[in-house]
Image (spheres, rainbow, N blue to C red):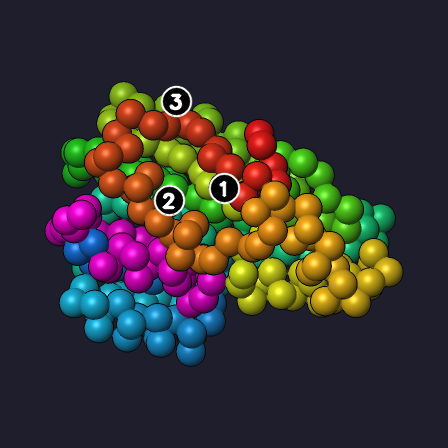
Amino acid sequence: MGKLLQGKLCIVTGAARGMGKALALKYAEHGADVVLMDINKEGLEKAAIEVEALGAHALPIVVNMASSKEINEAMDKVEAKFEKIDILANCAGISTSRLILDVEEEEWDRVFNINLKSIYLMCRRTAKNMIKNKVKNGKIVSISSQASKIGELGNGAYCASKAGVNLLTQVLGLELAEYGITVNAVCPGYVNTEMMQSVFEKRGPIEGMTPKEYEELLTSYVPMKRMAEPEEIAEFMLFLSSEKANYITGISHTIAGGKTLI
């Protein structure tokens, strides 16, 4: 298979680790230059070095995705350096492992600001850039979650925020279709990332289990009996970001090893 994104400019949020980093590297492998955004400065710089080692140009920007001011400043930097944006991948996200009655308002707001509001802000800026520059076959992809489709105990704020991502994806898919911009979301199941390991650590005790016991329990529910690797999610997101997916839009695609079938 040839390089699917040769000459494209991609923005990846949450690019310092996990699925975001895996996707940034996948984009670079396929010929794209990559803008990497994350609050984790050290991880971001390491990811940028790995992107450039693949022969792509990398622009790392440290940004708190909970801040609309910082998001807009970051996008100002992108548009000052590059004429147009071809692809946006919204991969930044956080989880909070608490029962709903224990979630404080500030914590709820932070989850929604990072998981949902940042996507609205990034999509708005990026879509306006694509329309202004008459980008052909622009692509927007976002990481949602299987938890957007089936509620999870001790994960309410995350579930609700990701459900919002799915509906935002549908609306943007409809509204941007006339410009040839496709908008899709990916709903992973359990993925072997640092964030998932943190979930085991924090939510296991809520369920009365050790982190290892909780990991084994969740994995046992997956028909394929394992977690996904970040690269597997990135591979599918690469497809949705390519011109092979020009007629797919407004869909939240589950990729969960059979755990969630909707």
Which is more toward the observer, 176 or 221?
Answer: 221
- Stretch in magenta: 1-29
Question: What is the quadrant of residue 246 in the picture?
Answer: top left
Q: Are marks 3 and 2 in contact (CB under 8 Å)?
A: no
Left or right: where 103 falls relative to 90: right
Q: Secondary structure at mark 2?
A: helix
**C-alpha distance separating marks 2 and 1:** 9 Å
Instruction: Name the N-terminal-most of marks 3 and 1.
Output: 3
Which is more toward the observer, 98 or 175?
Answer: 98
The numbered disc on residue 174 is 3
Q: Which residue lies under the disc numbered 1?
A: 255
Quarter holding the C terminus is: top right
Q: Secondary structure at mark 1?
A: strand
Instruction: Name the N-terminal-most of marks 3 and 2.
Output: 3
Which is more toward the observer, 206 or 250?
Answer: 206
Mark 2 Cα-neighbour bin, 10 Å: few <14, some 14–19, many ≥20:
some
Residue name at image x 29 percent, y 25 percent: 247
Q: Are marks 2 and 1 in contact (CB under 8 Å)?
A: yes
Q: Which residue lies under the disc numbered 2?
A: 236
Mark 3 Cα-neighbour bin, 10 Å: few <14, some 14–19, many ≥20:
some
The numbered disc on residue 20 is none
**Residue 76 placement (x, y as % from top left):** 30, 55
Asked if the magenta segment contains residue 27, the reply would be yes
Q: Say which amino acid is labelled 1.
A: Ile
Instruction: Name the N-terminal-most of marks 2 and 1.
Output: 2
Is residue 197 shown above or below 122?
below
